[in-house]
Each structure stands twice: as C-alpha cells, then as structure tokens.
Image (cartoon, rainbow, N blue to C red):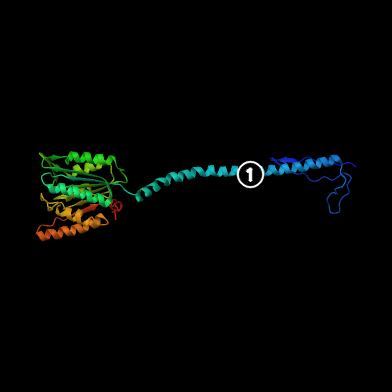
Amino acid sequence: MRWARPRPPARLDHVFIEPEEVAPASAAPDPRGSPIVLQALEPERIRHTYRWRAHRAASARLLVAIVEWRFVMMSKSLVSRLGAPLAVIFLTFAPMFAAVCAAEGPHKVTVVSFGLFGDQGVFRSEATSAAHIVGSRFGGDPVVIRFNTKTGGGATVEGLAATLQAAAKEMNGESDILFLILTSHGSPHGLAVTAGPLAETLTPSNLAEMLDRTGVRHKVVVISACYSGIFIPRLADADTLVITAADAHHASFGCEDKAKWTYFGDAFFNVALRPAKSLKDAFLVARSLVLKRELRQGFDPSHPQMAGGGNVETLLVARR
C-alpha cells in the first residue's frame, strides 16, 4: 500500500499554517466526507507523524512569541507617542504648581528697624521694642535694629540703604517679606535724621528708590512720625503695605526724650499688635486708641493711615 507524502507546513509572516490532512491514495471515501485513517502505518509514516507533531508545537510557541513581541512594541510605541505631549503638559503646569506651593508655604520675615532721630531716646526705645514685637509676632528672622544717639550712630540715610541691600541678599525676593520700621520726627518734606553732628532728611523719593533696589517684592513699611502720610503716594501699592502715624497734613504726638513710646507706637506695637491676628486688625484698634488719647489731651487728631498691601496681608500669619 502506497501513501501520498504530506506537504510540509506552509510559512506566512513567520507563522506556520498547518496543511490539510492527506489520506492514503488507496483509501476509500468515508461516508461523513473525511478520509479514512488506517490503523496500520508504515514506519516511515510513523516517523513523519512524530516530526509533524513536533513541528506543530514549535509553530504554536513561535506564534505566542510573535504576539508577545508585537504587544511590547505596541506599548513602546504608545509611550513614545505620549511622551512628548506629557512632557509639554508637565513643563506648562509645573511652574504653576510651584507658585501655588510657594504661596502656601511659610514666608520668611526680615525686620529692619531704624530710630533716626538721635537727640531723643524715645526713638531708640521705640525702634528696639517695636522690632522685637514684630519679630516675635510674625517670626522675624533676622531682626536688624539701628538707632542714633546724641553723639552719633549708623541709622543714617546711607546706613539705611546699605542695611536694606544687605538684608535683601539673604532673602528670596519673590516669597519673603521685608518689614521696615522707621521712627523719628517728621515734616512735610520727610523724616529727620540726626546722628551727632550729622543732620539730613530722608525723603519719600529716597526711600522709594532704596526699596526698589532691594528687589524684594513683598514689603511692609511702618513710619511713626509727624506728617508721615506723605510717604504713602510713593510707596503704597498692592505689594507694599504702608502704615503711618499721621496723614500728610497733621502732626503725631508723644515724642518725649524719657518716654518709651510715642502715642502711635504704643497703641500699634505695644498694645494692639500683640494679640491681633492681622496688621489690619491691629491698625484699627490702634487708630481708635490714638484718637481717644489725642482728644483727651486736647490735641488735633493725627489721623493714622493704612494703604496698599493687598498682596502682602494674607502672607503675614501671626503666631498664636
């Protein structure tokens, strides 16, 4: 009995396709339409059958490997396609997230306090005590205090400019807060500066230029002096909060050599700021206290002022 030799498996795209079963040439057709498989096989046919089954198993393993390889390549392709858009999205929004985190994080407060008029000790006392209260209330670090005496001192116009620059170098110009306190006699032209034989005037223009050169965005400026409201037009804006003991047309009171505070300094720093939750709360309380004291003494009200600082107030968080 002769057998027709089976055709080898066909190969298509690296996947082996099994050919149809081939019946013996002399086999009679099966009533069901499929070839009859004889029980007696020649030795060559048996060997071929074993080879054929092994080939089928190898073909199946190869098919699985190809499917897995195509899946991996498709995944890599998706990653490479999405990589650029994802990078663009990250670079676009990362600065925003960083800005939000910075705004929500703690802000360093640097306090600079100058007692400018050396002929009376009240300004030395007020500059020193006010700086310590602000530092304690808002976590000021560092606290820099300068004052003049009858014999001299470094709280001059030049000294103020140098101190502000030195402080700014240790600050983050975008997130930190510069808290400046100035106390002295004032006039419609500016603040009196006396240190021994030195006598000069700190004008609104001088101070505005000094603050601009620091590069520090958020600032608080508190000026305890007569006519100190003249500084508001040059200094106050959304990033700079300005608080003054008087408006531009009135004097303030309490400038006595043996005193520890002026009227405004005592009301704002010593009384109102210690328990207050914000500078605005402290200012409202201090303004009321000053007015009552001035009226009680028969003085023309000084009208303390507060302007600007819309972007600063929320950053200053008082310690509990």
Q: How many marks?
A: 1
User: In the displayed structure, does residue 48 sit left or right of residue 136?
Assistant: right
Whether residue 47 can be seen here: yes
Element on which disc 1 rests: helix
Q: Residue type at mark 1: give it.
A: Glu
Whether residue 187 can be seen here: no
Q: Position of residue 262 (x, y in %)?
A: 14, 52
Mark 1 nearby-residue class (10 Å; few <14, some 14–19, many ≥20): few
User: In the displayed structure, does residue 62 sit left or right of residue 259?
Assistant: right
Q: Which residue is drawn at 23% across and 53% down?
A: 307
Q: Residue at x 13, y 59 (%)?
A: 293
Q: Which residue is the site of mark 1?
A: 68
Q: Quadrant of the C terminus?
A: bottom left
User: In the displayed structure, does residue 294 sit left or right of residue 91?
Assistant: left
Q: Quadrant of the N terminus?
A: top right
Q: Residue at x 72, y 42 (%)?
A: 59
Q: Where is residue 218 in the image (x, y as percent from the top left)?
A: 28, 47
Decide which of 9, 140 is in the foreground and name it: 140
Decide which of 70, 110 is in the foreground and name it: 110
